[in-house]
Amino acid sequence: MNWWWLGLTVRSNYLPDNTPEFAQAASAAMAFSTANQVKVLSYTGRLDKGEIVALGHRLGVPWQLLWSCYQAGENMCGRCESCRRFIRAFQAQGLAIPGLIQRGE
Ligand SMILES: [Zn+2]
């Protein structure tokens, strides 16, 4: 069994690809199209971004390795909607924005 993990969030579920239904449909497509029965799962589908950041902080997530920006480049732009949501999630938790504008490679 192989797994493909999605970072679904509860408040972004107005986006079709950010829903449990999408994860189920993707799992069905993977089961149909692969020999190894890849299953698409998410631990975060019931959490908002602030809760995900708080959980990640408790778990010691290496945030500098995250790429959350819609733009390509050396660094995250810090201006697109994805960057702004990420920044707001850290601010809502009272946490410093760790290397947000630096891409970990
Ligand atoms: Zn960005």
Image: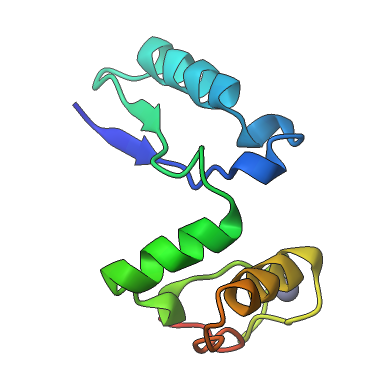
Residue appearing at x 54%, y 25% in the figure: 20
Front residue of 105/96: it is: 96
Which percent across, then down, holds residue 52?
A: 48, 58
Residue appearing at x 57%, y 62% in the figure: 50
Residue appearing at x 73%, y 82% in the figure: 77
Vertical arrangement, residue 29 with respect to residue 82, above or below = above
Most extreme residue toward the left is 1
Quadrant location, the N terminus: top left
Which percent across, then down, holds residue 31?
A: 36, 14
Residue 28 placement, left or right of 14: left
Residue 42 placement, left or right of 9: left
Vertical arrangement, residue 15 with respect to residue 97, above or below = above
Is residue 61 something that shows in the picture? no
Task: Examine the image and state in which quarter residue 69 appears.
Answer: bottom right
The structure's colour scheme is: rainbow
Task: Examine the image and state in which quarter residue 104 appears.
Answer: bottom left
Front residue of 22/30: it is: 22
Which percent across, then down, holds residue 60?
A: 29, 74
Quadrant location, the C terminus: bottom left
Front residue of 15/46: it is: 46
Is residue 9 something that shows in the picture? yes
